[in-house]
Amino acid sequence: MKYRRLGKTGLSVSEIGLGAEWLERHNEEECRELITFCEEEGINIMDCWMANPNVRSNIGNAIKDTRDKWLIQGHVGSTWQNGQYVRTRDTDKAKLAFDDLLTRLHTDYIDFGMIHYVDEVKDYETAMNTDYIDYVYELKRVGVIKHIGMSTHNPKIALRAVREGLVENIMFSINPAFDLQPASEDINTLFAEEYDPTLSGIDPDREELYKLCEKEDIGITVMKGYGGGRLFDADKSPFGIALTPVQCIHYALTRPGVASFMAGFDCIDHVKDAAHYEHASDEEKDYASVLAKAPKHAFADQCTYCGHCQPCPARIDIAMVNKYFDLAVMQPEVPDGVAGHYRDLEAHASDCIECGGCEQRCPFGVNVIYNMKKASELFGM
């Protein structure tokens, strides 16, 4: 298992994480088996948003002796009321539910206290202008939560939280299908059967979010990376083709700012399918050529940092050059950090010999040679 730094939290998280929602359908023994196997595979980050007392207890009993091996995202505002899940900004109800989470997980702290599921502007305003957020800050002040994060499916909300300096990490829904969709306050729009034919490329808000998180050192953990499983089925996928777990994982992990892909596991084989990513070949990871051949896609002329352009005879890491260039042009002046990372590359855009091999291999028709010229001009090398 490989690990990545989760932004300014400084914590090292496994590239594959455990999104524990599917554990709700399992008993304690089955939960323990799945969680133990995750530990054996080197998975060290878990998201537990669920309010159901049974699954919380099952998870807590499974990690009781291995709590120090796990980094846990626990959600503030996910509550269990009258036998069902309710999202709330009522501080008293949120406190009861969060105390319950700590008790059932047999712990006195949560690594990432997540402002739970904010997709609507009105809900964001409520969360940030009532004693709900005061409670979150108090949890952080006394050390019950180590870092403050937020879960959202709406890039406009995520952008606002990052710009306002409210969070250290974001849990965000990322896959190649969702990335084409414009921001919405209704998550159901992300599961559209067909796309608006005018869509072209990654939605600008989503693209800006990834770049801003990279710039501001805000780590992203990925939810809904499989699109609820629809991306595995050509008949259900809006692209008209099927992707594999490895391809979905690779797509998400190539977005700027992303540290961990939180996969849902219903059985041991699901864990194996995701963990295989760490040993997969470049061919197995190649989502780009699959999407380019799909009956329906909208990624033309846009670098997705997939690395399909390699190898370069001049040893240029073309995807990283494009990524640093995209990050740099967001600002009036090139940030020192981005310039430093660019200088540290083995080869630079100015080393391009304009052979054109990269453009022939690019599934999306990106004008790579032009991009190298612009990057060379911007960075001066």
Image: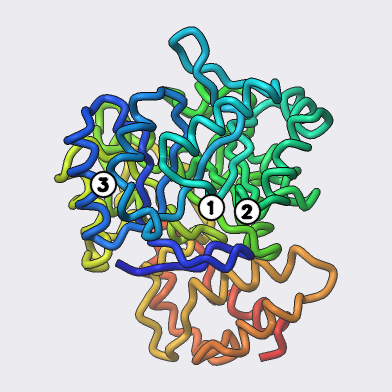
Rendered view: 17 above or below 361: above
Identify the mark at residue 172; answer none if there is no mark.
Answer: none
Pick whichever of labels 3 and 2 is earlier in the sequence.
Answer: 3
Secondary structure beneath dot 3 equals helix
Question: In the image shown, does 98 or 158 lie closer to the viewer?
Answer: 98
Quick one: quadrant of the N terminus? bottom left
Between the residue at mark 3 and the residue at mark 1, the CA separation in whole angstroms equals 18 Å
Pick whichever of labels 3 and 1 is earlier in the sequence.
Answer: 3
Question: In the image shown, does 69 or 263 lie closer to the viewer?
Answer: 69
The amino acid marked with disc number 1 is Asp
Between the residue at mark 3 and the residue at mark 2, the CA separation in whole angstroms equals 23 Å
Location of residue 127 (image quadrant): top right
**Residue at left offset 53%, top offset 28%:** 196
Identify the mark at residue 35; answer none if there is no mark.
Answer: 3
Identify the mark at residue 147; answer none if there is no mark.
Answer: 2
Secondary structure beneath dot 1 equals strand
The amino acid marked with disc number 3 is Ile
Location of residue 120 (image quadrant): top right
How packed is label 1: few (under 14 Cα within 10 Å), some, or many (20 or more)?
Answer: many
| Circle 1 residue | 111
**Residue at left offset 81%, top offset 28%:** 130
**Residue at left offset 62%, top offset 73%:** 324
Question: In the image shown, does 316 or 200 lie closer to the viewer?
Answer: 316
